[in-house]
Image: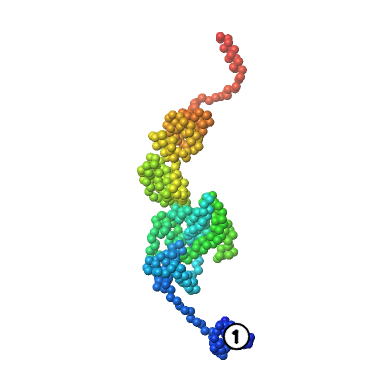
Amino acid sequence: MGMLAKIRRMHFRDHLPLREIARQTGLSRNTIRNWLRHKDVVEPQYKRREARSVVDPWAEQLGQWLRTDGHRPKRDRRTARAMFEAIRAQGYTGSYNRVCAFIKRWRRQESGKPGPAYVPLSFALGEAFQFDWSTEYAFIGGLRRKLDVAHTKLCASRAFWLTAYPTQSHEMLFDAHARAFAAFGGVPRRGIYDNMKTAVDKVGRGKARDINPRFFAMCGHYLFEPDFCNRAAGWEKGRVEKNVQDRRRQIWQHASERRWKDLDELNAWLGEQCRQAWADMANPEWPALTIAELLQDELMQMLPNPQPFDGYVEKPVRVTSTALIRFQRNRYSVPAEHAHAVLSLRIYPSQLRLVADAGEVACHARSFERDQTFYDFTHYIGVVDRKPGALRNGAPFAQMPEPLLRLQRHLLKQAGGDRVMADVLGAIPRHGLEAVLVAVELALESGRPSGEHVMNVLARLKSGMPPATPVATTLTVREQPQPDVHRYGRLRAEARHVD
């Protein structure tokens, strides 16, 4: 209609001749004359010329892939490059740019269609919570690291709790629930999840699920019922999904700008931010109440929070001939008497515990770095008792406390010093590391430490003063003796008289 209105203005208002109008518009005079004679004429719409594309034979297949990927999480969707490689293997001879243009045009057409409708949900106090993971980034220990953040949100009061972890493994999942329930002060009666691999071993037809045994044990410990969404139906736990978006724009934006010493410091700060948000934010369904105020009402409807679930993952490991076990590309020491044995490794979020038939034999702080070796020199004391020469270049003994290292440097300058040092280390299992360190420090202060000196000091420290034991007797003192200093002079005089 723009050209028709322009022609009518030029003719009836500006009184331009048809020749001038044709020159300015580029239209034929017959076309202009025909448009001016009919008042109800409509500007014609010319059909766009359709040019065939080299992608057309694969358009239906590409569209089917795109529709299928629309039901998958973003991280699981195929990229344009993957689709291009797939159809090229089937005989496609066009370029990658043509495939990108088709995908962009297809998505533009699909976005114009009306979206699906949903039913608003309502939850009773203490009825349910929703759980989900998100992937974030933060500077930990001077490095930008990828973190998995656990989001737990109560459906009624909208209270939420965030905890950051290096991975999404089972032990992290159990610890996230323990922290969230401790922060809320209770446990709801139902938990809503997607079909994450740490909770569901196999997704069956409809609502049928093969639940992971360890996850089911955690649910039984806290007495809540797990409920899993349908496949690719994230809107069924939309409150925690929106919580991921909101916290990413609010809390996590500030967390990513700061520098953190370790995860414990970051999680402590996240807990403070969550509690502050509870006090500041109003509940959407009851705007007159804050989240913290409504949480107090919800606590009365929630189950009591029991002791934290002992959420470890157990796996067998074989000890090498150097008394080391391997876990996630790192090596950890165990007592040398368990070399070549198979031990049970219990994996916690921040600890690794090794258990034998008689009980726990070793415990290490868990490291998420790679290709690191973590020693406990006390694990190798039994070996150096038989092979004292290993003390000189033994890697575990380079990590001994400083007093022991000073004593070792002094003793190894003497003949047979390695055997003497092995005897000193052999006292640690009997007397304890702290007592041996005190004895070594006292011996070093003397200026001429030796093995005998350390053992003598250790024996005196262990023996101490004999305890005072009361003597049982039937005699009683009627008159307390009084001190008389003049008795000594009288005794001396009597002694001279005798002489």
- Residue lying at the far right of the rendered structure: 14
Residue 80 visible? The answer is: yes
Q: Is residue 376 above or below residue 3?
A: above
Counting from the top left corner in percent of width and height, residue 304 is at: 49, 55
Counting from the top left corner in percent of width and height, residue 484 is at: 60, 20
Q: Is residue 112 above or below residue 135?
A: below
Q: Which residue is mark 1?
A: 20
Which image quadrant: the N terminus? bottom right
Residue 221 visible? The answer is: no
- Residue lying at the far bottom of the rendered structure: 37
Please state which of residues 420 and 206 is positioned toward the viewer in this rendering.
420
Q: State left or right for residue 284 relative to residue 84.
A: right
Q: Quadrant of residue 395?
A: top left
Please state which of residues 316 and 3 is positioned toward the viewer in this rendering.
3
The residue positioned 59% from the left and 64% from the top of the image is 288
Badge 1 crowding class, 10 Å Cα cut-off, few under 14, some 14 to 19, many 20 or more, is few
Which image quadrant: the C terminus? top right
Per the image, label 1 sits on a secondary structure element best described as helix
Please state which of residues 9 and 353 is positioned toward the viewer in this rendering.
9
Coloring scheme used: rainbow
The residue positioned 58% from the left and 22% from the top of the image is 481
Counting from the top left corner in percent of width and height, residue 472 is at: 49, 27
The residue positioned 49% from the left and 38% from the top of the image is 401
The residue positioned 51% from the left and 54% from the top of the image is 144
Amino acid type at circle 1 is Glu
